[in-house]
Image (cartoon, helix red, strand yellow):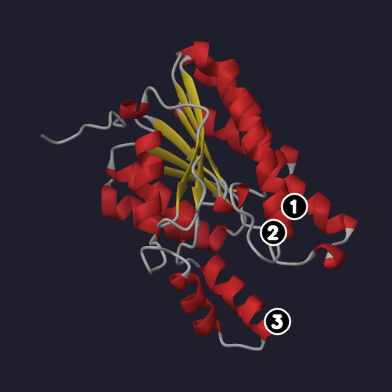
């Protein structure tokens, strides 16, 4: 029996969709029949991603270059997407990770930038999207965070601290919106092979006077499955949570990390 995810005809907004995990999620949603509204900072990469997804899947793909760390840009992205499609069913909040640094290396500006990019962007986008979901009495909000919200990662002070705020926001929002049939969940990737992870390996390698390859091997050895994840594997989970089949899952933070997280909950 083939599982019908019920995404045909749904409108999905995906932030940070030009590459990496965001692009993989957008492609996965398009393969299931969703129409897409995509944003990212860079117009060239965003346009290339949209064209590739449309050509592969036949999906309708609308784009808007957007800096989600700006409240005005976030608002316009959602409003213009609604003007184009008429409604919103799915919101995938995603933004690039903050820089790697230890506590005393971080300035007030870096803290503020991380809060705007990785916490407030999710709030701003959800604030614009939720009323449309309420009118349709159906919605999915999925925040792409990090396994760091459950097990802090060395050298990622900003990510460890700020993304935890997203979890508190999402859990509260899930309870508030449950009566409207709007489900809110967080997906917490571990080490997934993306440009972001490759860059982190280079930063850590420089600090430890090692090679990036040795850092990646160290990470692999810390994961029970003994490998880094693939973006497509991550996307499968997000697409399921966005679907009709995930109708009794809300307020959760689900890690996808090959077993890296050692806790029980």
Residue on which the image places disc 3: 207
| Residue shown at 51% from the left, 62% from the top | 45
Task: Tell me the tag on residue 139.
Answer: none
Q: Residue 40 appears at what percent x and percent y?
A: 58, 52
Residue on which the image places disc 2: 98
Q: Residue 162 appears at what percent x and percent y?
A: 72, 47
Dot in front, 2 or 3: 3
Q: Whole-Å distance between the Cαs marked 1 and 2?
A: 6 Å
| Residue shown at 47% from the left, 55% from the top | 21
Q: Whole-Å distance between the Cαs marked 1 and 3?
A: 22 Å
Q: Residues within 10 Å of mark 1 (few under 14, many from 20)?
A: many
The reply to whether discs 1 and 2 touch (Cβ–Cβ < 8 Å) is yes
Q: Earlier in the sequence, mark 1 or mark 2?
A: 2
Residue 175 vs 186, above or below: the answer is above
Q: Residue 26 appears at what percent x and percent y?
A: 41, 47
Q: Quadrant of residue 210?
A: bottom right
Q: Which residue is more in the foreground, 156 or 25?
A: 156
Q: Earlier in the sequence, mark 1 or mark 3?
A: 1
Q: Which residue is more in the foreground, 36 or 245?
A: 245
Residue 191 vs 5, above or below: the answer is below
Residue on which the image places disc 1: 114
């Amino acid at each position: 029996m083939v599982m019908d995810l019920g995404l045909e005809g749904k409108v999905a907004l995906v932030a940070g969709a030009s590459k990496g995990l965001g692009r993989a999620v957008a492609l996965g949603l398009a393969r299931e029949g969703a129409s897409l509204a995509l944003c990212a900072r860079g117009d060239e990469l965003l346009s290339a991603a949209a064209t590739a997804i449309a050509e592969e899947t036949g999906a309708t793909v609308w784009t808007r270059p957007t800096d989600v760390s700006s409240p005005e840009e976030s608002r316009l992205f959602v409003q213009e997407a609604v003007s184009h499609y008429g409604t919103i069913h799915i919101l995938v909040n995603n933004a690039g990770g903050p820089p790697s640094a230890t506590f005393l290396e971080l300035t007030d500006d870096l803290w503020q930038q991380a809060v705007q990019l990785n916490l407030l962007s999710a709030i701003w986008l959800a604030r614009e999207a939720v009323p449309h979901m309420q009118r349709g009495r159906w919605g999915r909000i999925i925040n792409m965070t990090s396994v760091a919200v459950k097990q802090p990662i060395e050298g990622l002070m900003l990510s460890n601290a700020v993304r935890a705020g997203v979890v508190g926001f999402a859990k509260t929002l899930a309870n508030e919106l449950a009566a409207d049939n709007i489900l809110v969940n967080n997906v917490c990737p571990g080490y997934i092979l993306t440009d972001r992870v490759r860059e982190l390996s280079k930063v850590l390698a420089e600090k430890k006077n090692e090679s990036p390859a040795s850092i990646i091997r160290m990470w692999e050895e810390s994961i029970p499955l003994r490998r880094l994840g693939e973006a497509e594997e991550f996307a499968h989970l997000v697409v399921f949570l966005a679907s009709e089949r995930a109708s009794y899952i809300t307020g959760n933070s689900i890690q996808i990390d090959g077993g890296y997280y050692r806790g029980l909950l």
